[in-house]
Image (cartoon, grey):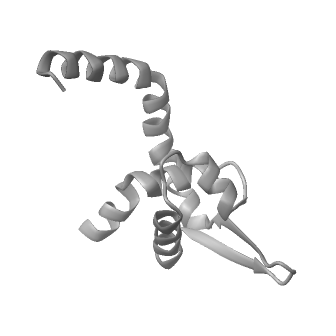
Amino acid sequence: MRQILDRIADKWSLLVIALLQRRTMRFNELRREIDGISQRMLTVTLRHLERDGLVCRTVHAEVPPRVEYHLTDLGCTLLDIIQPLVDWTEEHQHQIAHARAEFDAREGG
């Protein structure tokens, strides 16, 4: 159970799941939308989510190959759970940034 929670609750997985809730996306679309993620970390995250049955990877036989990712039915069951967390983060991000700045100023960081 802990391994599953670790996977779902990691910051990159949450962001990928939240983005894929809207639509099917290609790798570079996801990478552009997720600030700070490296190509390697996105690859690892997508592979883990695919292995866990939460994301489906579709390769289209084109030149060059087109690879798309979308949430599986199982992955969609997480949306009702993580959406409130995403909403809360968006709503309070400025307050958190302000609190961090105050803390850093106070602590000399």
The quadrant the N terminus occupies is bottom left
The image quarter containing residue 16 is bottom right
11 lies above or below 71: above
The quadrant the C terminus occupies is top left
Query: Residue 45, how many percent across, how many down?
Result: 47, 66
Q: Is residue 62 visible?
A: yes
- Judging depth in this view, the residue of 72 and 28 nearest the camera is 28
Q: Is residue 60 left or right of residue 4?
A: right
Measuring 52% from the left and 70% from the top, which residue is drawn there?
43
Measuring 24% from the left and 66% from the top, which residue is drawn there?
2
Measuring 34% from the left and 23% from the top, which residue is drawn there?
96
Query: Residue 82, how many percent across, how many down?
Result: 46, 46
Q: Is residue 1 visible?
A: no
- Judging depth in this view, the residue of 55 and 104 nearest the camera is 104
Q: Extreme bottom residue here? A: 61
Query: Residue 90, how many percent across, how many down?
Result: 49, 29
Q: Extreme right residue here? A: 62
Q: Is residue 57 left or right of residue 2?
A: right
Say how many tags the image has: 0
27 lies above or below 34: below
Query: Residue 101, how many percent across, how many down?
Result: 29, 19
The image quarter containing residue 31 is bottom right
102 lies above or below 38: above
Measuring 46% from the left and 58% from the top, which residue is drawn there?
13
Q: Extreme left residue here? A: 107
